[in-house]
Image: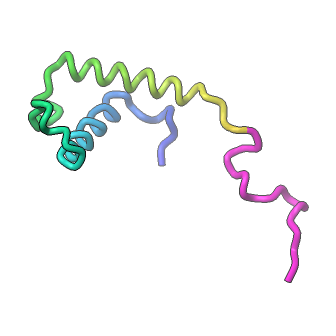
Amino acid sequence: MSSIQDVSPEELAKLFHHYEEALAGDFNCESRGRHRASWDQTPQDERRLRVAAVRLALMELASTPSPEGNERDYFTKPGEAEWGC
């Protein structure tokens, strides 16, 4: 899995668009007058908007500090494990 810093906003926006279009029918979103369009058929201004939104979201995620105790809270620190049978 790539880290947040390795993700291209353009690629993530394109992937998001793909999944949004694929799932639209499952959430009754097709009735809003939207037509299923590939990324390349999506209007340029809509693509720029989505890329800009993804860029801001990635910047926010990258700047959010990780929770205290690191991401592996479920592991004990060396020497602190309790063993028993």
The front one of 27 and 37 is 27
Task: Answer with the quarter of the image where residue 53 lies.
Answer: top left
Q: Main secondary structure of the magenta part?
A: loop
Q: Which residue, as the protein is rendered here, is positioned at the far bottom?
A: 85
| In the displayed structure image, the side of residue 28 where residue 15 appears, left or right | right
Q: Is residue 3 above or below residue 81?
A: above
Residue 78 among magenta residues: yes
| In the displayed structure image, the side of residue 75 where residue 39 appears, left or right | left
Task: Answer with the quarter of the image where residue 12 lies.
Answer: top left
Q: Residue at x 31, y 31 (%)?
A: 13
Image quadrant occupied by the C terminus: bottom right
| In the displayed structure image, the side of residue 15 where residue 65 appears, left or right | right
Q: Residue at x 75, y 58 (%)?
A: 75
The front one of 5 and 20 is 20
Q: Residue at x 26, y 34 (%)?
A: 14
Q: Whole-percent x and y of residue 7? A: 42, 35
Total number of numbered labels?
Answer: 0
Residue 76 among magenta residues: yes
Task: Answer with the quarter of the image where residue 15 lies.
Answer: top left
Q: Is residue 74 above or below residue 65?
A: below
Q: Whole-percent x and y of residue 65? A: 66, 30
Q: Whole-percent x and y of residue 27? A: 24, 45
Chosen colour scheme? rainbow
* Magenta span: 68-85
Q: Residue at x 66, y 36 (%)?
A: 66
